[in-house]
Amino acid sequence: MRHWPGNLVRFLAITLVVLVAAVLYGLGRLGLRLVVWRRARRAALAAGLRGRILRRGMMLLGATFIKLGQVMSTRPDLLPPQTIHHLRKLQDTLPAFSPRRARKILEAELGGRVEDHFAELDPRPVAAASVAQVHRARLRDGREVAVKIVRPDVRHTIERDGRLMVWFARLLELSKKLRLSQPVAHTREFIAGILEQTDLRREADNYTRFRANFAGVPGVRFPVVVPEKSSERVLTMSFERGRKLDALGPGDHSALAKVTRTTFLKMCFEDGFVHADLHPGNMLLADDGDLVIFDVGLCKFLTPDLHLQLVDFARCVAMGTAGDFVAHLRRFHTYMGDVDWDEVRRDAEAFAGRFRDGKAAEIEMGVFIKEVFEIARKHHIQPLPEMTLILVGVVTAEGLSKRLAPDVNTFHEMAAFLMPLVARLGLGAAPATPARAG
């Protein structure tokens, strides 16, 4: 009960933003209908208008909704390109908080004056995202560093928004059909992931783990943390120079695409520790040609059971038959009541045939995963909520690879990577009896 005044005010603010956005979008659509006569052109402009209004509305509402918009920007299977173009601007081009507040946080976290710790500190951030912003600085020993500072009061905002989103998810679960999608569990997983990013000690630990996992991998590196200049709300690390992958011009980027693809596959299937926010804005092509990966606050450690499930799901995606999908669903997912497995197999055969026959450039992993889960929902089969973050990462990484090398067949590349691992784990044939049943 102690949260209700703030929750009510926040609910009213969200409602107001949604209503204003709806009115602006409606007026914009009306204007397009009156001025633009070609239907296809009108639809494209409407999609761009929707993206622009969504982006501005989410920026007004703050970190939680900005992060939601970032997730939406990775879903070409759900949204048109014109909308995604605007939502991608939420990745690291957000308004910054003031240099005065940045200095205040630094001094509170590190103790003493800023000048006691840094010989230089650029007051203008080089990047500003939903949870934190980054400043270029120089230590007193001459090393050039990046200083990441958490936004003021961002954790409180996310916790408050999380309570409202869980409340709304509970309303959705009043519908028996929507309950099968587990909106409450998925919402809690989403909010927990954002909250983890507000504690930069976690991110520092993640950098240490990634650097260890990729110690023997040439061409891939992660920034080096300066622990004595880091805390819960401040993270100081080596400053890396290069071009972000979303800023690369036209050209042959197939070699880079292979590195990014192999990097993500290694995280998922070899290490069981995944960067779940691997969008192009979080990677640099360094001046020396290395791929530099940063902003590792949103990560997922795969338990042995979850890792086995992910590997088996990927095996089904990359080289499985309809029978493999049915066996996977029976082994790894809960289901409510009796399931007609013959009908599940028929549905799986229908959609698998469409994807197997598609051209490489036309195959979208996001669409594929979406249809798998549509079949699961149709037959009252529930996926684990923990898989949500991983699958968002899979779709994001696949989308990046497609941008760098459009003709790459992700399914074939994944199959080649998985074959030795599948053999080692003995996943050639999953048992027909379920491991868990609801």
Image: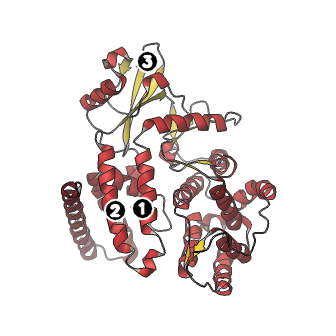
Q: CA distance from mark 1 to mark 2?
A: 7 Å
Answer few, some or many: residues within 10 Å of disc 1's Cα (few below 14, many 20 plus, some between 14 and 19).
many
Residue at 77 percent across and 63 percent down: it is 427
Q: Which mark is residue 139?
A: 3
Q: CA distance from mark 3 to mark 1?
A: 40 Å
Q: Which mark is residue 187?
A: 1
Q: Nearer the viewer, residue 174 or 207?
A: 174
Chain-order first, disc 3 or disc 1:
3
Give, as a three-letter code, the residue at label 2: Met
Marks 3, 1: nearer the viewer: 1
Q: Which quadrant would the C terminus be assigned to in this image?
A: bottom right
Give, as a three-letter code, the residue at label 1: Thr
Q: Which mark is residue 165?
A: 2
Marks 3, 2: nearer the viewer: 2
Residue at 74 percent across and 56 percent down: it is 418
Image quarter for residue 390? Answer: bottom right
Task: Classify mark 3: helix, strand or loop.
Answer: strand
Residue at 78 percent across and 69 percent down: it is 429
Answer few, some or many: residues within 10 Å of disc 2's Cα (few below 14, many 20 plus, some between 14 and 19).
some
